[in-house]
Amino acid sequence: MVKGNSTVEGDSVTKGNTTFEKDVTVGGNSTSMAIVW
C-alpha cells in the first residue's frame, strides 16, 4: 500500500474514477479498489 502512494501524485487518476471501475473487471486489480476505499 505504501508503494501505492504514487496514486496520490497522479490526482488526475482520481478524476477518472471510471477507470478504476474498469480495473475491477480484471478481478486481480480488485486490490487497487481496496486502496480507494
Image: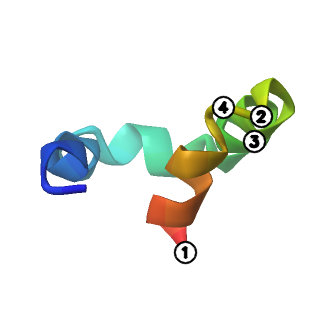
Q: Is residue 14 left or right of residue 27?
A: left
- Disc ID at residue 16: none
Cβ atoms at labels 2 and 4 below 8 Å apart: yes
Circles 1 and 4 in contact, beta carbons < 8 Å: no
**Discs 1, 3 touching: Cβ within 8 Å:** no
Dot 2 crowding, Cα within 10 Å, few <14, some 14–19, many 20+: few
Q: Nearer the viewer, mark 2 or mark 1?
A: 2
Q: Tell me: 18 left or right of 14.
A: right
Inter-mark Cα distance, 2 to 4: 4 Å
According to the image, label 4 marks what residue? 28
Residue with the mark numbered 3: 18
**Nearer-N-terminus badge (3/4):** 3
Closer to the camera in the image, 15 or 22? 22
Q: How packed is label 3: few (under 14 Cα within 10 Å), some, or many (20 or more)?
A: few
**Amino acid identity at mark 2:** Gly
Q: Quadrant of residue 10?
A: top left
Q: Disc 1 designates what residue?
A: 37
Alpha-carbon span between mark 1 and mark 3: 15 Å
| Closer mark to the observer between disc 3 and disc 4 | 4
If you read the primary sequence from the N terminus, does the residue marked by circle 1 or circle 3 appear first? 3
Above or below, 4 against 1 in this view is above
Under mark 3, the amino acid is: Thr
* Distance Cα–Cα, label 3 vs label 4: 17 Å
- The secondary structure type at the circle numbered 1 is loop
Residue 4 placed where, x, y %?
24, 46
Name the mark nearer the viewer: 3 or 2: 2
Looking at numbered disc 4 in the image, what kind of residue is underneath it? Gly
Cα–Cα gap, marks 3 and 2 = 15 Å
Return the residue at label 2. Answer: 27
Q: How many marks?
A: 4
Question: Cα distance, mark 1 to mark 4?
Answer: 16 Å
